């Protein structure tokens, strides 16, 4: 009998963006890439893989393919509204990367909020009480769209252990969200499921893959083990500080999934902010003036370093 799992907007969203190469293409688009060679220069993906992912992003409605030269026919790829709404996820991944990623020799980005004129850190806040959102301050209940679904995991090329290009902003962050199984495990742990069988029941991940991903998350410093039984030896899996700081990325991915993949009845999950008792509607705010961030209200400068030389390029 086919196992069913509870419906989840994160699961549906990860079927779209739970792929490292896809995230690197979206990153390149945010940094101004439009044409095939621009994407290759930015992320170094093989031609066949890049072509496949661009085609998939167009079919899913995240990019639009436009003809810019008729002879020979040449196309460019423009981000759609659906793709652009992942902007908040990208800001949270960037925030996590700056906190925990190894940036030595990699490009950096400076974000400036046009409203206040200050360089800022994107900060996830509750739109009711305006307090910064932390995983331990969020509770949840079943929503009107809760139901059951058959998990189908499409096979994709794994780039998790491949070194990122020096031109990549999202190195570790893209590898983490780009591994759907790892992100689904973290989703389970964030909802209080800490034991192997609990996580297995929540995700329907094959046992060999689940064991490998748990070990990988421990190696990356995102999870830690806590023994609760000596005979036989059994462990719980808990978030480290590094893992806790990943929560906003999944939070905004959930919000994106609720917008584009939710059932007519409504979202399958309702989040509650414990500090104010209201249903949680997360927004991204400026760390300096505390006002909401809008994509058009942000200037960013890409900084590339080669030895003692620094090159700064304003994008957009």
Image (cartoon, rainbow, N blue to C red):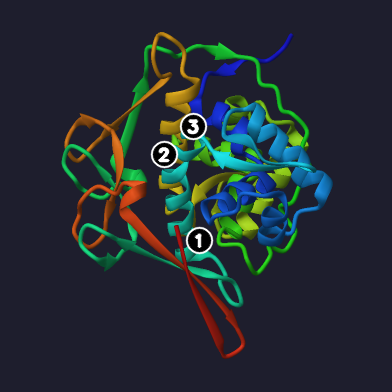
> How far is the residue under mark 3 from the one under mark 2?
17 Å
Between discs 1 and 2, the one toward the N terminus = 1
Residue 2, x across and y down, in percent: 72, 12
Whether residue 133 can be seen here: yes
Between discs 3 and 1, the one toward the N terminus = 3
Splitting the image into 4 quarters, where does residue 130 fall?
top left
Classify mark 3: helix, strand or loop.
helix
Looking at the image, is mark 3 or mark 2 nearer the viewer?
3
- Indicate whether 137 appears above or below 202: below
Splitting the image into 4 quarters, where does residue 288 fall?
bottom left
| Left or right: 38, with 63 as reference point | right
Residue at the (61%, 55%) spot, across then down: 218
> How far is the residue under mark 3 from the one under mark 1?
23 Å
Whether residue 231 can be seen here: no
> How far is the residue under mark 1 from the one under mark 2?
16 Å
Read off the residue under disc 2: 251
Read off the residue under disc 3: 82
Classify mark 1: helix, strand or loop.
helix
Quadrant holding the C terminus: bottom left
**Residue sitting nearer the eye, 9 or 38:** 38
Residue at the (18%, 59%) spot, across then down: 289
**Outermost residue, right direction?**
48
Residue at the (58%, 77%) spot, across then down: 104
Task: Answer whether labels 3 and 2 touch (C-beta < 8 Å).
Answer: no
Residue 252, x across and y down, in percent: 42, 39
Residue 13's disc number: none
Looking at the image, is mark 3 or mark 1 nearer the viewer?
3
Read off the residue under disc 1: 97
Task: Answer whether labels 1 and 2 touch (C-beta < 8 Å).
Answer: no
**Residue sitting nearer the eye, 55 or 213:** 55
Residue 240, x across and y down, in percent: 48, 56
């Amino acid at each position: 009998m086919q196992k069913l799992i509870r419906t989840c907007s994160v699961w549906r969203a990860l079927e779209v963006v739970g792929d490292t190469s896809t995230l690197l293409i979206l990153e390149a688009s945010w940094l101004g890439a439009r044409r095939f060679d621009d994407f290759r220069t930015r992320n170094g993906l093989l031609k066949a893989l890049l072509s496949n992912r661009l085609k998939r992003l167009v079919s899913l409605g995240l990019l639009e393919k436009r003809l810019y030269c008729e002879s020979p026919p040449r196309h460019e790829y423009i981000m759609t509204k659906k793709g652009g709404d992942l902007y908040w996820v990208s800001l949270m991944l960037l925030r996590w990367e700056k906190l925990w990623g190894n940036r030595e020799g990699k490009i950096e980005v400076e974000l400036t909020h046009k409203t206040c004129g200050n360089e800022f850190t994107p900060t996830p806040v509750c739109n009711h009480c305006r307090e910064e959102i932390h995983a331990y301050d969020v509770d949840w209940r079943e929503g009107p769209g809760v139901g059951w679904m058959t998990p189908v995991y499409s096979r994709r090329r794994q780039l998790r252990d491949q070194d990122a290009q020096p031109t990549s902003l999202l190195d570790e962050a893209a590898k983490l969200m780009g591994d759907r199984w790892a992100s689904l495990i973290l989703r389970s742990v964030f909802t209080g499921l800490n034991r192997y069988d609990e996580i297995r029941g929540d995700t329907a991940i094959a046992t060999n893959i689940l064991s490998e991903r748990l070990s990988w998350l421990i190696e990356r410093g995102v999870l830690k083990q806590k023994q609760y039984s000596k005979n036989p030896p059994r462990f719980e899996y808990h978030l480290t500080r590094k893992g806790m700081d990943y929560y906003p990325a999944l939070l905004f991915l959930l919000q994106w999934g609720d917008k584009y993949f939710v059932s007519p009845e409504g979202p399958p999950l309702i989040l509650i902010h414990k500090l104010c008792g209201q249903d949680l509607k997360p927004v991204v705010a400026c760390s300096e003036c505390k006002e909401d961030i809008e994509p058009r209200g942000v200037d960013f400068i890409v900084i590339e370093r080669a030895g003692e030389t620094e090159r700064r390029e304003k994008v957009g």
